[in-house]
Amino acid sequence: MKNATTILGLAVLLFASHSACAEWNFVIGGTYVSGLNDVVDVLEENLEDRGFSVDTLVIPIGVSFQGYNEMPSGLAFGFTFGPAVAAFGDIDYFDLPVGVDGRYFFQTSGDSRPYVAAGIRYHIAGGDDIDGSDIGPYGAVGMEFRREGDTGWGVELAYDGAEIDIENPRRSDGIESVKPGNVMLSVFLVF
C-alpha cells in the first residue's frame, strides 16, 4: 500500500505543476488483460495441489479510468486506475492497478492523434494466496480518433511489467511472481 501512496503522491505533484497551462482529458474504457489467465492458473494449481477440484470463471476484461493533462506541445502527464479485474468461483482474486505516466502526442490537433506513453504501475491485488505487489514499468502506443470535438474514442496496446507475488508451494522459495497485466489491448472513450 505504501507503493500505491507513493504513486498517487507523484501524480498529484505532476498535475499541480502542469495544470495552469494544459488541458485535462479523461478516458474510460474496456481492456483485454492477457496476464489474468496466468494469475488464475497459479491459483488453480494451488487449490488442485490441496486436493480440490477447481472451476473458475475467467473473463479477462477490465475497466479503467485515466486522466491526463496535455500541454500545447503534445506532452502530457497522466494517472491510471485500472483495468480493474476479478476472478470468481473456486478462487477469489481482484486487482486494481494504479499508475502514473508521461505521454507524447505526435499531432496536437486533428481528428486522429497517435501517441506513446511510459510510466510505472502498482497492483493493489488481493484474494487467495496473494502475498504482495511490486512496482513495474508501463509502456503503450495508441491512437485517439474524432478529437476535433469534445469527445472521441481510441485504441491502445500496452505492456504492464508490474508483478504480484503469489504463494506457490511448488517453488523452492514458496513465491511465484506473475505479471497480471502483461500485454493489454484497450478500446476507450475520451472526453
Image: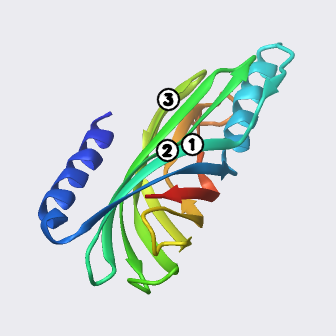
Residue 23, percent from left and from top: 27, 67
Q: Is residue 47 left or right of residue 117?
A: right
Residue topped by disc 3: 131
Determine contact: label 3, label 2, CB under 8 Å.
Answer: no
Q: Is residue 91 visible?
A: yes
- Amino acid type, residue under disc 2 in the picture: Gly
Q: CA distance from mark 3 to mark 2?
A: 20 Å
Above or below — where is 157 with respect to 62? below
Q: Residue at x 38, y 83 (%)?
A: 108
Residue topped by disc 1: 63
Above or below — where is 18 with respect to 148? above
Disc 2 residue crowd, few under 14, some 14–19, many 20+, Cα 10 Å: many
Q: Is residue 10 left or right of residue 81?
A: left
- Amino acid type, residue under disc 3 in the picture: Asp
Marking on residue 148: none
Q: CA distance from mark 1 to mark 3?
A: 24 Å
The earlier-in-sequence mark between 3 and 2 is 2
Disc 1 residue crowd, few under 14, some 14–19, many 20+, Cα 10 Å: some
Q: Residue at x 20, y 47 (%)?
A: 9
Q: Is residue 100 visible?
A: no
Determine contact: label 2, label 1, CB under 8 Å.
Answer: yes
Residue 93, percent from left and from top: 61, 26
Front in this rendered view, residue 45 or 73: 73
Above or below — where is 154 with respect to 6? below
Q: Secondary structure at mark 3?
A: strand
